[in-house]
Image: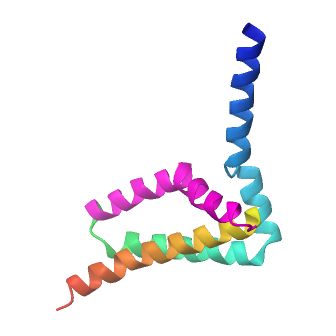
Amino acid sequence: MKRIISAAILTLILAGSAFGLSDKEYTRMKKSSRAFREADEFMTECYRECRDTLPRSQFLEIQKEQREWIKSGRDEEAQIFIEDGMTRTEAYTKVTDMRGDTLHHFCVIYRNANYK
C-alpha cells in the first residue's frame, strides 16, 4: 500500500513539474526562439513602464500580481493554448506577449484617467 501511495505522489510531483515552465526551459526558449525573446523583452518593457508611470502603491500591486502570474498564471494560460495544439514555445510566447499587453494597458488607463 505504501508503494502505491508513494508512486501516486511521485506521479503528481512529476506531472506538476512537467506542466510548468522551468528556469532551464525559459532560458532555452529565450536562446532558441526569437519570437519568445521579443515577447519577453516587450513584457519587461511594459513592466518597467508600470514602474515608471504608476503611483508606488499601484505598482506594488502590479508587482505582486506579476509574481503570481509567473508562479502559476503563466502556466495555466499557456496550457490552454497547448491543449489547442500550439507547441510549448508558441504558447508561452503568446501568453507572455498577452501579459505585456495587459501591463501596458494598466499604464494607458492610468494616463487617460490622470490626463490634464
Outermost residue, right direction?
Answer: 32
Q: Quarter of the image holding residue 89?
A: bottom right
Residue 65 lies, with reference to residue 43, above or below; the image says above
Residue at screen point 74% across, 45% down:
18
* Side of 49 relative to 45 (left or right): left
Quarter holding the C terminus is bottom left
Q: Quarter of the image holding residue 56?
A: bottom left
Residue at screen point 63% across, 75% down:
39
Q: Is residue 72 magenta?
A: yes
Task: Give whichever of 24, 105 is nearer the camera.
Answer: 105
Q: How is the image coloured?
A: rainbow
Q: Quarter of the image holding residue 85?
A: bottom right
Residue at screen point 44% across, 73% down:
102
Count of numbered circles on the image: 0
Image location (x, y in percent) of residue 90: 72, 70
Image location (x, y in percent) of residue 78: 63, 61
* Side of 116 relative to 51 (left or right): left
Task: Give whichever of 97, 41 is nearer the camera.
Answer: 97
Outermost residue, bottom direction?
Answer: 116
Quarter holding the N terminus is top right
Image location (x, y in percent) of residue 93: 67, 70
Image location (x, y in percent) of residue 23: 70, 51
Residue at screen point 72% across, 39% down:
15
User: In terms of secondary structure, what is the magenta stretch mainly?
Assistant: helix
Q: Which residues are magenta?
A: 57-86
Outermost residue, top direction?
Answer: 1
Q: Is residue 58 magenta?
A: yes
* Side of 61 relative to 69 (left or right): left
Task: Give whichever of 71, 45 is nearer the camera.
Answer: 71
